[in-house]
Image: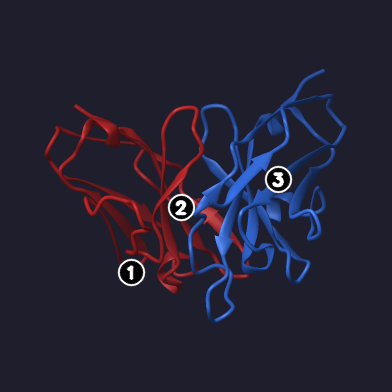
Amino acid sequence: QVQLVQSGAEVKKPGSSVKVSCKASGGSFSTYTLSWVRQAPGQGLEWMGRIIPVLALTHSAQKFQGRVTITADKSSTTAYMELSSLRSEDTAVYYCARVPIAVDGSWDSYGMDVWGQGTTVTVSS
Amino acid sequence: QSALTQPPSASGSPGQSVTISCTGTSSDIGGYNYVSWYQQHPGKAPKLMISEVSKRPSGVPDRFSGSKSGNTASLTVSGLQAEDEADYYCSSYAGNNALVFGGGTKLTVL
């Protein structure tokens, strides 16, 4: 049974950075991508970006380009999302989620079938 | 990469059917068959209900079905049950390796 376990809640000052981890267990790290999705209080889901661990390739939403860094450590099957220059609007629950890579090699065909439990990041002075 | 458009709310009585729409453009929904739907109960992580427009993952009741016409995708919940009350989100591949979500629809079972 594949599980994604995320790091604990964080409280950060405006202008600082936060790094959230997502450890995968029970499956092969090479057969899926990992996306990061956030949800501000009372708001909807927002896709931030993804990493394809087997290729060490990342993509990010235009909104977060230059501010988000997504990495993965294949040896520990852990992915990381670092968001810099934090502002109050970044207060949200941050989720990692798995998308299996399709047989034709595409990484956007399937949906996010396994999610982490979420990490609350609060940005406050 | 603008968010997909969903109605903020939908409702139905137990046993009835309800359909939630998700409208995009030819650059996302209309251009690819990579639409997914997620259910989210309060305080919980989202759960995948539909992928690739109309495919149900194992364990998802067949009361949930998905479809697409042009730039609009739809999720239909038949035989509404109390536990279906939740927020529902659509998502689509949007080209250039990007994904986009809808704003979400709160489904109320009356």
Q: Are marks 2 and 3 in contact (CB under 8 Å)?
A: no
Label 2 Cα crowd, 10 Å radius (few <14 / some 14-19 / many 20+): many
Q: Chain of mark 3?
A: A
Q: Is residue A48 above or below residue A107?
A: above
Q: Are marks 3 and 1 on the same chain?
A: no
Residue at coordinates 19% horizontally, 39% vertically from top-left? B80
Q: Which amino acid is tagged 3? A: Cys
What residue is disc 1 on?
A: B70
**Residue nearest the observer in this picture, B15 or A23:** A23
Task: Give the CA distance from mark 3 to mark 1.
Answer: 36 Å
**Residue nearest the observer in this picture, B99 or B14:** B14
Please identify the quarter of the rendering in which residue A71 is found.
bottom right
Label 3 Cα crowd, 10 Å radius (few <14 / some 14-19 / many 20+): many
Q: Position of residue B96 (x, y in %)?
A: 63, 70
What residue is disc 2 on?
A: B4
Label disc, if present, on residue A62 of the rendered structure: none
Q: Which chain is blue?
A: A
Tag 1 secondary structure: loop
